[in-house]
Image (tube, helix red, strand yellow):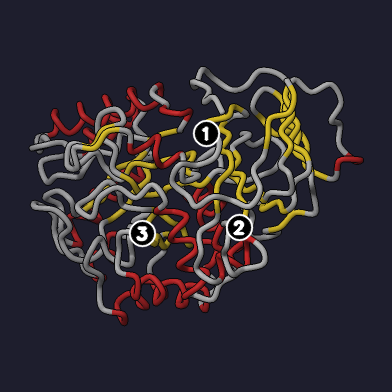
Amino acid sequence: MAVEVAGGPMKGKLVVRNIGLLLSGDLGEPILDADTIVAVDGRITAVGRAKNVDGDKPDRVVDAKGCTVAPGLIDSHCHPVFGDWTPRQNQLGWIESCVNGGVTTFVSAGEVHLPCPAKDPIGVKALAIAAQRTFANFRPSGAKIMAGAPIAEKTMGEEDYAEMARAGVTMIGEIGLGTVNTGPEAKKHVDWCRKHGLQTIIHTGGPSIPGSNLISHEVVLEANPDVISHINGGHTALAPGHICQLCEQAKGAIEIVHNGNEKAAITALKTAMELKRTHEIIIGTDAPAGSGVQPLGILRTVAFLASFGGVAPEVVFCMATGNTARVRKLDAGLIAPGKPADFVFMDKAQHTSGKTLLESMSLGDLPGIGMVMIDGNVSCGRSRNTPPADRIPEVVGH
């Protein structure tokens, strides 16, 4: 199947029919009683049963062939630098490969893998603004990359954040990857960012790369950021009791990543759910990093949390889509009227022991991806990275 080059949303009317299972991304109703989606100019206009929606005169029809359709996955924590290349891993095409893993939106946690990144305020601001501008327009395979996440340095003051906000920067990278590493200093930078509308995140756990720092639970609690980045460590996690304390006392969203400590991830998941904070759990990869690039990192984390955490897969999918979109203030993550037509078509992998896609993921198996659509455009057909799916959707009309 040909892959369309991103040139804006699809023009015209799209009808996706014969959906076997529709995952909404919304914890309030994770599974929708629907088999058809209609979208116009890349935006969903109707979701429901075929007999109840206007599917007439489409410009494009996709026959889901009974597959599961979910919102495009969101990686809440990644580290892009320049284009679709990571200098730390010297790997090309990692973003496009992650689209083959169902990820349609990527959120930068800092462009830190540039060799010898600037530490002075002018250099930090220049890199952030350049990344924000570049990735606003650069969309490999149609992927949406939210970038321009400066790393807080002690040399920076309030006016530096105000200047970046005026330039269009909307978030900062992980506090702790730079020279800001104490509670009082981190809180000062968080307060400045909050005043000027920049979302804040903080590294949690031991150092991850040369120049980064241990960020303890005390620092996180004092700083009070919007997101507790990789609460399960990136890579070294805090003690289980400290993770539980953060879930109980910290106000920020609870982010679990693929590249962290798996046992700590289960501790955070179960504690947060017991505290009825399910709606604040989000998922990322923390890639590219020293552990490499994981095109299936989000899918693997969903399967891991569902199987070892005992959480229904459709609920974990919400953490990887609607939860992340709401927390990170993204126009994505839900299958609902008004939202972008970003879809992942999946089915249970061939020869899995699970009878359905959800059962197979509860057993720890990955699904097979048959198609990914972004803004109504086909970004990839049968994924080159997942196991082959039992059923594959098909574009049957234009």
Q: Where is residue 28 in the image (x, y as percent from the top left)?
A: 68, 60
How far is mark 1 from mark 3, CA to CA? 23 Å
Q: Position of residue 24 (x, y in %)?
A: 66, 51
Query: Which of 325/36 is in front?
Result: 36
Whichever of callouts 2 and 1 sits on the residue coming sooner in the sequence is 2
Res. 380 mark: 1
Up-down relation of residue 381 to residue 259 (above or below): above
Q: Which of marks 1 and 3 is in front?
A: 1
What is the crowding at mark 2: few (fewer than 14 residues within 10 Å), some, or many (at least 20)? many
Question: Which residue occupies 49% across, 61% down?
Answer: 302
Res. 366 mark: none
The amino acid pointed to by label 2 is: Lys
How far is mark 2 from mark 1, CA to CA? 18 Å
Q: In this view, does 394 lie to the left or right of 263?
A: right
- Res 96 → quadrant: top left
Question: Which residue occupies 14% across, 44% down?
Answer: 153
Spot the residue most to the front: 351
The residue at which mark 2 appears reads as 348
Whichever of callouts 2 and 3 sits on the residue coming sooner in the sequence is 3
Secondary structure at numbered mark 2: loop
The amino acid pointed to by label 3 is: His
Q: In this view, does 141 lie to the left or right of 242?
A: right
The amino acid pointed to by label 1 is: Cys
Which part of the image, by quadrant, shows the N terminus?
A: top right
Question: Which residue occupies 27% across, 45% down?
Answer: 173
The residue at which mark 3 appears reads as 258
Secondary structure at numbered mark 1: strand
Q: Where is residue 318 in the image (x, y as percent from the top left)?
A: 57, 57
What is the crowding at mark 1: few (fewer than 14 residues within 10 Å), some, or many (at least 20)? many
Up-down relation of residue 170 to residue 268 (above or below): above
Question: Which residue occupies 35% across, 40% down?
Answer: 171
